Amino acid sequence: DVKVTQSSRYLVKRTGEKVFLECVQDMDHENMFWYRQDPGLGLRLIYFSYDVKMKEKGDIPEGYSVSREKKERFSLILESASTNQTSMYLCASNSGINQPQHFGDGTRLSIL
Amino acid sequence: RKEVEQDPGPFNVPEGATVAFNCTYSNSASQSFFWYRQDCRKEPKLLMSVYSSGNEDGRFTAQLNRASQYISLLIRDSKLSDSATYLCVVNRSGGYNKLIFGAGTRLAVHP
């Protein structure tokens, strides 16, 4: 079974802080993704990575950056957190194009 | 217009009922289609892929109509445990490995 692990289930940070969300997968998947989910909007892709040190912008990359130094780990960084980044953040991975994605438990992030 | 549109519901049905969800997508070049299930405050989990010829998995049947660009999910003999939000997911052809998620349809099955 694919296991995608996110470092925190709940996180509370202050405006202006630098925030790191970590994600690890154990299935040697090439592709990893970061989404945010907000009521009524569905999941929206922030960034994804198809290889170590490779990254591509998703639909809403503004205010975020990512890091993929190792194949199993994909980090999402909020450079200077703002209240509109309060959301549920979901990490996912898959093994190839058009393959279903497997999600972590999610991190509910609140920015005060 | 959203790339993937679903009726948000909620659909309130009694146990044993048959319920169907529809989903429309705007990109005619899309090639991969999925239904995911998401329980309250949990992550989405793959329910089933949707194939061109239609496919069935136990009480669940998925259909794809490329000409009309819609996907359906039929649940027969609903169980209380089927209560969840069902997400329609379509790949964005031309974009590398990008999936587009609908906002979801909420199902509540009651005794």
Image: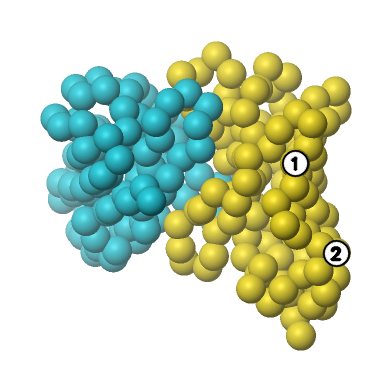
Residue B64 seen:
yes
Q: Residue type at mark 1?
A: Asn
Image height of A13 relative to B80, above or below: above
Q: Nearer the viewer, residue A22 or A15?
A: A22
Residue at figure coordinates x 62%, y 28% from the top left = B32
Q: Which residue is mark 2?
A: B18
Secondary structure under badge 1? strand
Residue at the image point whose x is 22% and y is 38% from the top: A72
Q: Residue at x 69, y 37 (%)?
A: B50
Residue A33 visible in image: no
Single out the mark in the foreground, 1 or 2: 1
Q: In the figure, the cyan chain has which letter?
A: A
Q: Which is more toward the observer, A10 or A85?
A: A10
Q: Quadrant of the N terminus of chain B?
A: top right
The colour applied to the residues of chain B in this rendering is: yellow
Label 1 Cα neighbours within 10 Å, binned few <14 / some 14-19 / many ≥20:
some
Subunit ID for the residue under disc 1: B
Protein chain holding label 2: B
Q: Which residue is mark 1?
A: B55
Residue type at mark 2: give it.
Thr
Q: Quadrant of the C terminus of chain B?
A: bottom right
Depth check, front residue: A112 or B42: B42
* Mark 2, other Cα within 10 Å: few <14 / some 14–19 / many ≥20: some
Q: Is residue A106 left or right of residue A53?
A: right
* Residue B74: % across, % down: 80, 53
